[in-house]
Image (tube, helix red, strand yellow):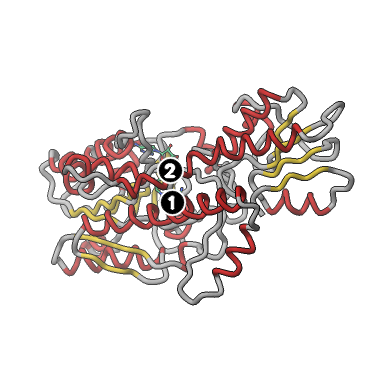
Amino acid sequence: MIKKNKLDNKIIPCIIGLGYVGLPLLVNLSKKFEIIGFDINKKRVNSLRNGIDLNNEFSKNELTLKKNCLITFDQKDLSKSNFYIITVPTPIQSNYKPDLSHVTNACKIISKFIKNGDIIFLESTVYPGVTNDICKNILSKTKKSFYIGYSPERVNPGDKNHTISKINKIVSIETTNRKIINKVKKVYSHVCKKIFFSKNIREAETAKVIENIQRDLNIGLFNEIYKVCEKLNINFNEVIRLASSKWNFIKYNKGLVGGHCLPVDPYYISYLAKKKNVNMSIVLAGRKVNNGMKNYFLSKIKKNLNKLNLKNKKICICGVTYKPNVSDMRNSLAVEISKKISESYSNCYTFDPLLQMNDIKKLGLRPINNLHNSDILIILTRHNKVINLLSKCKNKIILDYFK
Ligand SMILES: NC(=O)c1ccc[n+]([C@@H]2O[C@H](COP(=O)([O-])OP(=O)(O)OC[C@H]3O[C@@H](n4cnc5c(N)ncnc54)[C@H](O)[C@@H]3O)[C@@H](O)[C@H]2O)c1
């Protein structure tokens, strides 16, 4: 028989939201804990139960979860947990204001089941104050004594070198209770290389959001340099190679910035800053330049196409997800560009080996399942699978903008 105090110490984590962030946590923690994965999307839950990750981050083999892992859309299953980890989306509204509805909904669902002593962690990217001012407030209505923390996620979909067990993780909780801190460390030590512990949640929230802003701004800077190099007929790639020979030059590349994080996070902190009468013009400058790259490449592509004899020629746009080797289409500028090109050229098709034909069709594009019969290939997202196919292509015109 298990002694009562042993039972009290048993941690049963529950991951709320099984997307790009939540699923890797579930898979890794299931190696050590009895665990629950909860998602409101029944289609997602059913496919995961069948070992299929429609995001293509895990193979069927990797998804063969142990019996100790329950994947569910039934809220009642949450009652078994005592350590909730929230990994739901944090998009923006059409007016660029943060949309925290998924986070507040997740907290309301957890509220129905938390017990005294439970631990709740938020992992979604937010602006400073959300964990304590919004999540804690919702959960406090239960009158239960719980512990809340924030641990931002750095998982990088499609990147096999920086998987969660190989990267450092910020873990923040504002308690001095050693027993709770030890429980938190016990859980998080299994999903990172090293914990960077913080006793201040707002600092941890801010750290995450600025990581992405720094990246967005740097890509914006390189996009701007690229545009001026083009105008001056200077080879951008060669300029970057030469500048990179300096010890403190930080190398980035030009690119189409998309996905759920970089195009969104600058608006989170600038929303809060505006409330405090701080104008974050530099933070938002990256957004302006990077969003503008859609029209920049669109007119460049059209200019290049118009120089060609297009009679009886089939055009194929290759790769439309937001970055190479991921099937995520959220905020993808490549999708936007493809739509515009397809509208202007009736002989234009879209090929993406990471998407189903139907997904491409749903975007309003004409899907095609191979490159063989196309004459002109426009490479927008350089998936490894696309690049491998290109090496086998003969007698085709290839417009590859992001080498
Ligand atoms: N995708 C990334 O590369 C990445 C990296 C670091 C941080 N983040 C941050 O992590 C958070 C999650 O991003 P994601 O890309 O994993 O999103 P996602 O859309 O891939 O997954 C979120 C999942 O949460 C589910 N969900 C929504 N509301 C729910 C609720 N109330 N209860 C249970 N499930 C719910 C959705 O159905 C979905 O399956 C965001 O804040 C994002 O900014 C994302």
Quote the CA–CA distance across marks 2 and 1. Answer: 8 Å
Q: Earlier in the sequence, mark 2 or mark 1?
A: 1
List x then y, in percent, for residue 226: 56, 52
Q: Nearest the camera: 206 or 274?
A: 274
Q: Residue furthest front?
A: 232
* Amino acid type indicated by mark 2: Pro
Q: Is residue 373 left or right of residue 283?
A: right
Residue at numbered disc 1: 216
Whether residue 279 is situated above or below residue 197 in the rendered picture: above
Q: How many marks?
A: 2
Residue type beneath disc 1: Asp
**Viewed as shown, does residue 264 lie left or right of 105?**
right
Count residues near mark 2 (Cα–Cα under 10 Å), then give few for <14, some for 14-19, many for 20+: many
In terms of secondary structure, where does tag 2 sit? loop
Residue 64 visible, this angle: no
**On the image, numbered disc 2 is attached to which residue?**
263
Give the image location of residue 83, x and y in percent. 29, 53
Locate residue 162, reporting x and y percent.
51, 64
Residues at marks 2 and 1 touching, judged by CB atoms closer than 8 Å: yes
Q: Quadrant of residue 93?
A: top left
Q: Is mark 2 within 8 Å of ligand 1?
A: no
The percent coordinates of residue 66 (x first, y second) are 50, 55
Name the quadrant where ligand 1 sits: top left
Q: Residue at x 47, y 50 (%)?
A: 220
The picture quadrant where one finds residue 334 is top right
226 or 215: nearer the viewer: 226
* Label 1: how many Cα within 10 Å (few below 14, some 14–19, many 20+): many
Which image quadrant is residue 17 in?
A: top left
Please, is residue 136 above or below residue 1 in the view?
above
Question: Residue at position x 38%, y 46% from top?
Answer: 285
Which residue is nearer to you in this view: 228 or 329? 228
